[in-house]
Amino acid sequence: MATEPVQITIDQLRRAFDMALRHIESSAGPMVTLKEDLFWSVPADELYRIDAEPQDLTIGQLSESWQHVEDLLARQDPAVGHHLVWLADVIRAIGQDVP
């Protein structure tokens, strides 16, 4: 099943994040609490292979993912693309918990 690549402008992405964050803030207030810490993680090389079931599930930790994001905010780490993955871990947990 071949599909065309999905193209998203940074402006659209920024606006979508802003809308989602405004919703979370109006629903949950200025701070969210992550009720869970550990989660199943599918390695990147298996994540988009829908023709085979993932074999190498690993365990991720939201507190560790958030620490990477905090380090970025404090400029202790240089920004790297993987910061989006760590941020996505946290955003997924929030999105599954906030109505």
Image: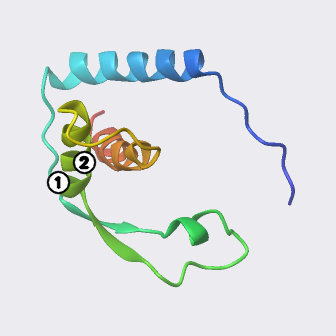
Position of 16 with respect to 71 (left or right) is right
75 relative to 5, above or below: above
Disc 1 element = helix
Which residue is found at the position 12% from the left and 40% from the top? Answer: 33
Classify mark 2: residues with Cα within 10 Å, few (<14), some (14-19) or many (20+).
Answer: some
38 relative to 14, above or below: below
Q: Position of residue 17 (x, y in %)?
A: 43, 23
Disc 2 element = helix
Mark 2–mark 1 Cα distance, whole angstroms, equals 9 Å
Q: Position of residue 29 (x, y in %)?
A: 14, 21
Which residue is found at the position 22% from the left and 46% from the top? Answer: 66
Of the image marks 2 and 1, the number of the one nearer the N terminus: 1
To which quarter of the image does residue 98 belong?
top left
Q: Position of residue 73 (x, y in %)?
A: 22, 31
Q: How many marks?
A: 2
Return the residue at label 1: 63
11 relative to 2, above or below: above
Residue at the bottom extreme? 55
Numbered tag placed on residue 68 in the rendering: 2
To which quarter of the image does residue 7 belong?
top right
Position of 1 with respect to 31 (left or right) is right
17 relative to 5, above or below: above
Q: Amino acid at mark 2?
A: His
Q: Amino acid at mark 1?
A: Ser
Viewer-side residue, 96 vs 5:
5
Position of 28 with respect to 97 (left or right) is left
Position of 59 with respect to 47 (left or right) is left
Which residue is found at the position 78% from the left and 42% from the top? Answer: 5
Numbered tag placed on residue 29 in the rendering: none
Q: Position of residue 58 (x, y in %)?
A: 37, 76
Q: Quadrant of the C terminus?
A: top left
Which residue is found at the position 37% from the left and 38% from the top? Answer: 79
